[in-house]
Structure formats: structure tokens, C-alpha cells
């Protein structure tokens, strides 16, 4: 059950990974058809020909290009605005720096709890149980090396996240009195970043191209790793059991996995045009993957943390969880498409735009009057307004709760008979020890021991 859900998950995540640079290419007035052709060629070279080793080395080079472009844009942005202190001051005055939003409501879109708890569960699903991560962990020689790789990844992700967030503050500080979206310079918020790069790097030849290469590299890294692992998983679990052992098996397996990679790649590229129309890319990525991410994490957690879990409980819990998440996420996306509820952005200004205050103010007023008033009779069901950051958490909890209840109802196994090696140490210590039959000990005469030793000699 976990394999099909994971394949869906990695397929959705790969589509989002391509959609991000695709949007940036559109914003930079590039040719989308060239992007699609180069994307398919990159997947052929990286996944079909090279395998895991090529993917890992490609990821290393791509990460270097991406991080280098991020830091270059960061430095230029700080210099263009007037320093870190000025950026922080403008962002604070504009209400963009909110550290302690402690609202515990599940319906608050962004809060400290959503970021700390909800995103932790999302990262656990993406790193802790992902086949992509497992493939890389098993590729290193020892468990110590695997732990070191996780530590390095954690430090690297923290640095990249901080750079990305501060770049967002720089963009606000630079355009807080002339919003590119209000003035229709860009069509959507996801396209502000390339516009900002072209602005601050106008006098730095090659930097916009370096930044664009970094975006495409990040998309390639996301897609190549996912497709490479998905092809191997599909072959091992669905095709290999039906193949006969013969000298040609390895050659046939390689050809089958190459064809699988091409098919999955074509599907991902084709679906990009749908993902591109679903709105904010960050919310879309967590929503689409949230359908199965919580269920997968719940299945693994149920098996590792609940000693009395059974197969029936896991199956029922997984089905209920995915059905519930399809209902919640599908309903939320449908109601947002119908404009029954929207998330209001923070206020912006067009006071310093070159088109003139009066023209822009009139345009803003017209835009406001064209927005339909909320219809009380068509308000969405409240469960559809749950924050997208909690999707993985909800899916995981549903699997564990339903799975535990069904396991008890269907007859939980005796904890004495379970294999303790299947559980982590923190759970193992609470399991009952196996009881052994007590027997009485009798003394053996020395003469018998002597006779036995003589016979053996």
C-alpha cells in the first residue's frame, strides 16, 4: 500500500519542482518550449544513462551553482537597499517580521505552531521515510556516514532557508512603495524573484543567467532523484517478481527502468501546466503531497511505535487517512477556485511608482470594487479552511488512531510474541519480557560425571 502512495507523492513533488523554474522562465520572458526540451534531455542524461552515481554528482554540482547564485543575489540586494539595518527596519514597520504568532487554531494559515509542528511532520515524511533518502543512506558504507550526511543536510537546509527568507525581506524593502503585482509588472507573486534579480543584477553581466541556471538546476535535482528512485521501486516491487532468472535479466531490467523513467518524466512535464495554474507554489506543493505524505508517515509510525498494530489496522487506517485528506484538500482547492474564501495579502503601496499616485490609486480602487462581496450562504465548510501546514500531521494522526482501534477490534497480537528488534529502543524498553518455564535443578553425583568423561574420551 505504501509503494503506490509514495510513487504518487514523488510524482507530485517532481511536478512542483519543475513548475517553479518554469514560472521563473516565463517571468524572465524566456521561451517555455526550449525549457521543456532541455528538461527532457537533462532527465535522459541524468537518470536514464547515469543512474544513482550520476544523479548524486549532478546534485552536487547543481547545489554549488544554486547556493552560489543565492548568495550573489543576497549581497547585491543588501547593497541596493542600504544595508541590513535598513532592510530590517522597513520590514518591521511593514509588519513582515512576525516571530511569535502563537495562535493555536488549525485555521490560522501561518503561525509558530504551524511552522514548528506542521512543517516538522512534513520534513519527517520527506526525509525520514522517503525512498529517495533511503536510497542515499544505503549507498554510504556505514550508519555513521549516513548520520553525518543527515547532519550536513540539516545545516545546509538551515542556511539556505535563512538566505531565502532574508531575500524575501530584501524584495519587500526594495519594492514596498511600488508593488510590482499591483502595478501589473508581474502577473503573480511567484514571479517577483526573477524580476528582482534582473533589477539588482542589471550591471552584473552573467549573474541573471547564473541565477536562472541555479533555478533550473534545483528543479533538475528534485526531479532526477525522484525519477531514478521511483523507477527502481516500480521495477523491484511490481516487475521483478514476474521475471525469470536468466543471463539476460540484468540487461532487460536496465531497459525496463530506462523506459519507466522516460514515461514518468513525460507525465511530470505534462502535469506542470496544470500545477502552474493552481496558485501559490508553496501551498500547492504541500497540498498535493499532503494527500499521501501523512498517510505514509502514519503507516511507518504505526509499525514502529504501536506494538499491537496489525496488517488490517494499517490498511484500514491508511485508506481512511487518504480518503479524508482527498476530501479536505480537494474541497479546499475547489472552494479557493470558486473564490469562496481567500487569504488576504498584507498591504502594499504604490506611492513611489513612476506612473503617478493618482493613476495607480484609481487602478487599485477599481480592482477593489471588482472583487465580489463574500456570499454568506456559500461559505465553505469549516474543515476546508484548515491551514495547509497541518495536512501531513492530520494524515499521520488519522492512520495511527484508526489503525490502533481497528487492530484492537480485530484481535491485537500478544506483546510477548512480537519481535523486539522491529521497534526503536524507546518502545522496546516497555515491552514485556518473554517468560520461560521454570525447572528444578538437581545435583549430579561426581561418579556419573566421571563415567561420562571417560566415555567421551
Image (tube, rainbow, N blue to C red):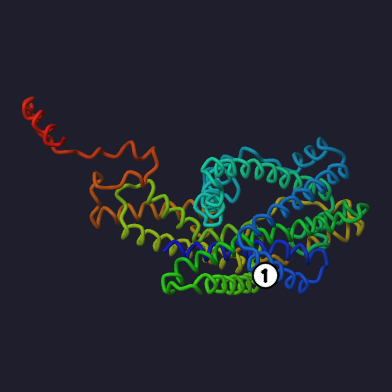
Residue displayed at 45% across by 66% down: 237
**Left or right: 251 with respect to 345?**
left
**Is the residue marked by circle 1 packed among few (<14), some (14-19), or many (20+) residues within 10 Å?**
some
Front position in the image: 25 or 364? 25
- Tell me residue 72's x, y (percent): 82, 47
Q: Secondary structure at mark 1?
A: helix
Residue displayed at 79% across by 45% down: 71
Q: Would you identify the image quadrant in which residue 215 lies?
A: bottom right
Residue 47 seen in the current view? yes
Front position in the image: 373 or 238? 238
Q: Is residue 253 above or below residue 66?
A: below
Front position in the image: 120 or 265? 265
Residue displayed at 71% across by 52% down: 63
- The residue wearing badge 1 is 44
Q: Would you identify the image quadrant in which residue 189 lies?
A: bottom right
- Tell me residue 147's x, y (percent): 55, 41
Quarter placement of the C terminus: top left
**Left or right: 175 with respect to 441?**
right
Residue 107 seen in the current view? no
Q: Would you identify the image quadrant in which residue 456 lies?
A: top left
Front position in the image: 301 or 38? 38
**Left or right: 419 with respect to 357?**
left
- Tell me residue 358's x, y (percent): 88, 58
Quarter placement of the N terminus: bottom left
**Left or right: 424 with respect to 271?**
left
- Tell me residue 200's x, y (percent): 87, 51
Amino acid at each position: 500500500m505504501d509503494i503506490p502512495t509514495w510513487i504518487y507523492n514523488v510524482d507530485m513533488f517532481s511536478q512542483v519542482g519543475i513548475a517553479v523554474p518554469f514560472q521563473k522562465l516565463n517571468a524572465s520572458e524566456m521561451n517555455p518550449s526550449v525549457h521543456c526540451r532541455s528538461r527532457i534531455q537533462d532527465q535522459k542524461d541524468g537518470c536514464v544513462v547515469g543512474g544513482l552515481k550520476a544523479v548524486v554528482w549532478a546534485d552536487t554540482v547543481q547545489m554549488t551553482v544554486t547556493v552560489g547564485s543565492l548568495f550573489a543575489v543576497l549581497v547585491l540586494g543588501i547593497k541596493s537597499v542600504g544595508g541590513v539595518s535598513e532592510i530590517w527596519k522597513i520590514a518591521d514597520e511593514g509588519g513582515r517580521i512576525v516571530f511569535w504568532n502563537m495562535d493555536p487554531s488549525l485555521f490560522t494559515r501561518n503561525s509558530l505552531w504551524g511552522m514548528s509542528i506542521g512543517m516538522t511532520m512534513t520534513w519527517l515524511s520527506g526525509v525520514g521515510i522517503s525512498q529517495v533518502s533511503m536510497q542515499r543512506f544505503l549507498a554510504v558504507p556505514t550508519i555513521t556516514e549516513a548520520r553525518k550526511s543527515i547532519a550536513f543536510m540539516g545545516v545546509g537546509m538551515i542556511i539556505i532557508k535563512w538566505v531565502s527568507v532574508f531575500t524575501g525581506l530584501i524584495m519587500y524593502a526594495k519594492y514596498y512603495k511600488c508593488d510590482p503585482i499591483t502595478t501589473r509588472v508581474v502577473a503573480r507573486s511567484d514571479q517577483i524573484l526573477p524580476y528582482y534579480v534582473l533589477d539588482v543584477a542589471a550591471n552584473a553581466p552573467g549573474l541573471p543567467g547564473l541565477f536562472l541556471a541555479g533555478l533550473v538546476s534545483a528543479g533538475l535535482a528534485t526531479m532526477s532523484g525522484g525519477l531514478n528512485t521511483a523507477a527502481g521501486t516500480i521495477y523491484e516491487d511490481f516487475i521483478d517478481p514476474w521475471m525469470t532468472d536468466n543471463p539476460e535479466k540484468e540487461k532487460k531490467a536496465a531497459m525496463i527502468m530506462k523506459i519507466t523513467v522516460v514515461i514518468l518524466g513525460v507525465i511530470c512535464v505534462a502535469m506542470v501546466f496544470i500545477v502552474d495554474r493552481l496558485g501559490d507554489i508553496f501551498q500547492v506543493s504541500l497540498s498535493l503531497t499532503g494527500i499521501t505524505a501523512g498517510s505514509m508517515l502514519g503507516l511507518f509510525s504505526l509499525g514502529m511505535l504501536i506494538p499491537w498494530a496489525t496488517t488490517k489496522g494499517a490498511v484500514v487506517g491508511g485508506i481512511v487517512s487518504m480518503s479524508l485528506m482527498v476530501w479536505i484538500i480537494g474541497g479546499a482547492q475547489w472552494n479557493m477556485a470558486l473564490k469562496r474564501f481567500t487569504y488576504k495579502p498584507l498591504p502594499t503601496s504604490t506611492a513611489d511608482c513612476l506612473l503617478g499616485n493618482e493613476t495607480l490609486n484609481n487602478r487599485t480602487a477599481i480592482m477593489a470594487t471588482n472583487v465580489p462581496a463574500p456570499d454568506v450562504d456559500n461559505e465553505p465548510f469549516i474543515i476546508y479552511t484548515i491551514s495547509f501546514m497541518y495536512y501531513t500531521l492530520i494524515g499521520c494522526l488519522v492512520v495511527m488512531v484508526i489503525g490502533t482501534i481497528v487492530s484492537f477490534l480485530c484481535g491485537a497480537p500478544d506483546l510477548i510474541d512480537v519481535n523486539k528488534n522491529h521497534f526503536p529502543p524507546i518502545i522496546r524498553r516497555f515491552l514485556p519480557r518473554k517468560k520461560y518455564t521454570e525447572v528444578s535443578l538437581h545435583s549430579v553425583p561426581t561418579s556419573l560425571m566421571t563415567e561420562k568423561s571417560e566415555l567421551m574420551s
